[in-house]
Image (tube, helix red, strand yellow):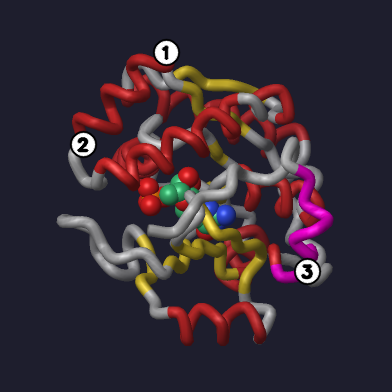
Amino acid sequence: MLAGPTAVGKGTVADQIRRRHPDVWISVSATTRAPRPGEVDGVHYLFVDDTAFDAMVEAGDLLEWAVVHGRDRYGTPRDPVTQALDLGRLALLEIDLQGARQVRETMPGALFVFLAPPSWDELVRRLVGRGTETDDERTRRLQTAVWELAAEPEFDATVVNTEIHATADKLVGLMRARAREAPARRPSTVPLGPSTVPPSTVSPSTGPPEHRRS
Ligand code: 5GP
């Protein structure tokens, strides 16, 4: 389970792991966000509309899901994770903090790794540098990032993403070590997702920042 703030490089780390460690199975999330240039449906995400996402939630097909950056929904399809674990594969989920907290409940034995930027300035530089977001979207993502960075102590380990190859290798090394100690077990099937938590019970100190929709 890999989480960390916007633009820290989670997607790039996942791409490197795909290339350098093909034995690692990487979960493909469903999202209502539009594809960015170069993103391939079924490889980087399953790009779905709101109706299809609703259907997955209602059918209990998602292991976890969340509204991320106050805008789009993202979720992990449950069956592929279960199948990968049943086959004894190393499995990587790259998800946001809300999703990580949900997975903590159903898969307490999983390894939770926080991917951290070398510095705040570097995080802003990477976000601006990739140039895929509008000014509004960047502001929203940086607000979420402050909240996500504060959650680092909740994780089992932190990897600072300074050099992408080293980061990918370090993460896979941690996964292998954990798998040797305690092989991951399939998730329990407790109903999950933000829809099960009434908004009034989400405390500002634990929930993501609220964003005004533009
Ligand atoms: P992006 O739009 O930049 O690809 O991703 C935005 C955020 O959504 C990132 O923090 C990423 O980790 C998170 N994310 C991607 N897939 C999932 C998922 O399946 N579940 C959750 N909860 N978050 C996800």
Would residue 28 be counted in the magenta stretch?
Answer: no
Query: Residue 165 falls in which quadrant of the image?
Result: top left
Q: Spatial distance from mark 3 to mark 1, Cα to Cα? A: 35 Å
Residue 26 showing in the rendered view? no
Q: Nearer the viewer, residue 202 or 117?
A: 202
Over which residues does the magenta segment extend? 195-203
Say whether disc 3 or disc 1 marks the residue closer to the N-terminus: 1
Residue placed under numbered mark 3 in the picture = 196
Q: Is residue 55 left or right of residue 193?
A: left
The kind of residue on which mark 2 rests is Arg
* Disc sitting over residue 119 in the figure: 1
Say whether disc 2 or disc 1 marks the residue closer to the N-terminus: 1
Residue depicted at 66% across the width and 65% down the height: 63
Q: Are marks 3 and 2 in contact (CB under 8 Å)?
A: no
| Element type where label 3 sits in the image | helix
Say whether disc 3 or disc 2 marks the residue closer to the N-terminus: 2
Give the crowd class for mark 1: few <14, some 14-19, many >=20 residues within 10 Å. Answer: few
Residue placed under numbered mark 2 in the picture = 130
Q: Spatial distance from mark 3 to mark 2, Cα to Cα? A: 35 Å
- Place of residue 39 in the rendered image (x, y in percent of width and height, measured from the top left): 23, 58
The kind of residue on which mark 1 rests is Ser
Would residue 200 be counted in the magenta stretch?
Answer: yes
Q: Nearer the viewer, residue 189 or 128?
A: 128
Image quarter (top left, top right, bottom left or bottom right) of the N terminus: top right
The kind of residue on which mark 3 rests is Thr
Q: Spatial distance from mark 2 to mark 1, Cα to Cα? A: 17 Å
- Place of residue 166 in the rendered image (x, y in percent of width and height, measured from the top left): 38, 20
| Element type where label 1 sits in the image | loop
